[in-house]
Image: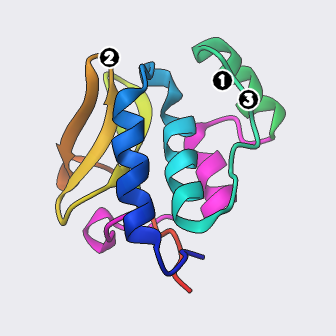
């Protein structure tokens, strides 16, 4: 459940996250950090250091895909049009699954090789609510 200060906590997380040199495949860690900032709940249950170890970790977790892992962690997805600020957004980029955070009414932030990429939410496939109190 999101804390009472979740919006401020998410803002602070995003400021700090922009300073980090992320790799595009670290989207799971990026999103888990945002969820932890909003809720205090640590979702980093799998560890990986590159795309290959991510595939192995997902397989070992019984999920096999990033999409299925998120379904286990946050339940059934919702349509992106139903997503609200702070919710997790899912899309494919160049055939690769990506997770991001909805930060405004229509823009989600995803990791990109040059930093963050803002993507219109309607260019995304699915979303998951991060529950409120």
Is residue 69 highlighted in magenta? Answer: yes
> Which of the colour schemes (rainbow, by chain, secondary structure, one colour) is used?
rainbow
Please report whichever mark, 2 or 1, sits nearer to the chain's N-terminal start.
Answer: 1
Q: Mark 2 points at which residue?
A: 113
Q: Residue 19, percent across and down?
A: 37, 29
Circle 3: element type: loop
Circle 1: element type: helix
The tag on residue 47 is: 3
Is residue 9 highlighted in magenta? Answer: no
Q: Distance between the residues labelled 2 and 1?
A: 18 Å
Q: Distance between the residues labelled 1 and 3?
A: 7 Å
Circle 2: element type: loop
Q: Which of marks 2 and 1 is in front?
A: 2
Q: In which quarter of the image is residue 98?
A: top left
Q: Residues within 10 Å of mark 2 (few under 14, many from 20)?
A: few
Q: Name the residue under label 1.
A: 54
112 sits left or right of 78 in the view: left
Region rendered in magenta: 62-86
């Amino acid at each position: 459940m999101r804390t009472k200060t979740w919006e401020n906590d998410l803002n602070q997380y995003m400021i700090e996250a922009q300073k980090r040199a992320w790799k595009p495949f670290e989207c799971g860690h990026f999103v888990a950090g945002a969820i932890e900032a909003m809720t205090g709940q640590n979702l980093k249950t799998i560890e990986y250091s590159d795309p290959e170890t991510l595939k192995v970790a997902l397989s070992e977790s019984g999920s096999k895909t990033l999409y299925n892992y998120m379904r286990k962690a946050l339940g059934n997805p919702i349509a992106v049009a139903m997503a609200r600020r702070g919710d997790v957004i899912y899309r494919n980029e160049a055939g690769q699954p990506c997770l991001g955070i909805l930060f405004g009414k229509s823009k989600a932030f995803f990791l990109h090789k040059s930093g963050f990429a803002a993507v219109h939410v309607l260019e995304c496939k699915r979303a998951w609510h991060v529950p409120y109190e």
